[in-house]
Image (cartoon, rainbow, N blue to C red):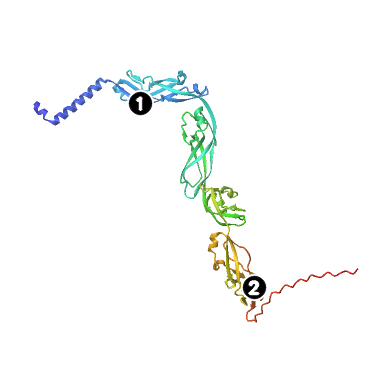
Amino acid sequence: MKKWIANNLGIKILSIFAAFILWLVIINLIDPTISRHFTDIPVTILNENVITSANQVFEVKSGDTVDVTVKGKRSFIEGLDETDFSASADLSKLSTVNTAGIQVKLNKPAKENIEIDWNNEVLCVSLEEKSTQQFKVEIERQGNLADSYEMGEAVAQPNMIEVSGGKSKIKRIARIGVTVGLTGESRDFERDLTPILYDSSGDVIDATNVTFSHDTVRVRVEILPTKTVPVYVDIQGKPAEGFTLIQTDFKPDTIMVAGTKQNLEKIKSLTVPINIEGANVDVETEVDLSEYLNGTECKLVEDFSTVSIRCVIEKNGKRTLSFVNTDINVKNLSDNLNFSYLDESERHDITLTGGEADLQRVTVTNLGAYIDVKGLGPGQHTLEVMFDLPPSLQLKSKVRVKVLLTQSGGQQPEAIPEPEPVPTVTPTALPIDG
């Protein structure tokens, strides 16, 4: 029989199960005493006014939570959790070393005696003189609006907050801010936000044991459409004698502005003046664009506040070119007139001054020499030769040519010679009879 039981697995398992059931029955009948540990039960602070009435503030250094061990009947202990306990510390009983004993109570009635042990833990605080200061609320943005929109005016209500706390902590506060989180908005909105304390390095200061005159700040935010407009530079004045403005570079050449739809329609471009009067070196400057938006009721979008301008000034070079009358174009010749030069082969020398690069590029062909006979009738005329030169080049002296216009189909008149100067005769003084 014993051998049969020993070799039968099913009987073994059944025996173990039966023993476990029997153990449970015995345990429940006996209901033994057990211990159980509970951690991080929050400590409620009582009579804070004892500290605040003395114009002081306190900060908890340790003892804001307490661990508890409970001993009692198993049937009761196993039904407990952390919420069945309350712990408190009375600041009116603060010791000379700034500690107050913690008292723990069980909020759940027990039929049997229950032992509660928290190892006589104490609440330890530090005391400090109370300080109060006012700060302006700064509004910061985080995130992005919908495309082609920009945040306009943002108003905080209240815009000033009074902060009270320990003198050392209040002294660290450099500013108070509220952060507006943007998630693709395209319309005006309002939000209630919590103020945040910052030190001079921009780091957040823990607001524990700090009180605010207002726990929340209502922020009203205006959302404005944007527009891209071109930027132009207006050169004023001339460089010093013997110097030339070669080129003007500036960035950005477009900016983004924000405003109401009506105001955006009014602004077409932005022109920035720069004075180079008397300059003999490059003129470089950074211009604040906001002053050129006056009267438009628009605002610059972030990252478009300035324009960098560079005017390249060079000392003039010099170059002499030679050309004949046949190199000159004739403009606005009437259909009923014939044109000719009095001297087709007459040669002219011109001297150009200006930037070296433009001087090197200019040739007789691209001088653009021409005369304009608009409104002239038949006869001999002396005309000034005009040139299509780059703005950086100047002509040292003027060139004039003599031309002859005749009626089409008529007899060509002879050239009228230039009158020769008549010598001036100095009268001889005669003696006066006496």
**Left or right, 36 with reference to 154:** left
Considering only vertical position in the picture, is 433 above or below 11? below
Of marks 1 and 2, which one's residue comes earlier in the chain?
1
Q: How crowded is mark 1: few (under 14 residues within 10 Å), some or many (20 or more)?
A: few
What amino acid is labelled 1 in the image? Thr
Assign the N terminus to one quadrant of the image: top left
Q: How crowded is mark 2: few (under 14 residues within 10 Å), some or many (20 or more)?
A: some
Considering only vertical position in the picture, is 239 above or below 206? below
Considering only vertical position in the picture, is 114 above or below 350? above
Q: What numbered label is drawn on residue 39?
A: 1
Say which of 72 and 311 sits in front: 311
Furthest-right residue in this view: 434
Q: Nearer the viewer, mark 1 or mark 2?
A: 2
Residue 164 image point, x, y percent: 52, 29
Residue at 66%, 71% (x, y): give it: 382
Residue 372 image point, x, y percent: 62, 70
Considering only vertical position in the picture, is 325 above or below 217? below
The residue labelled by disc 2 is 402
Q: Is mark 1 on a helix, strand or loop?
A: strand
Residue 414 image point, x, y percent: 66, 79
What amino acid is labelled 2 in the image? Lys
Whether residue 133 is visible, yes or no, is: yes
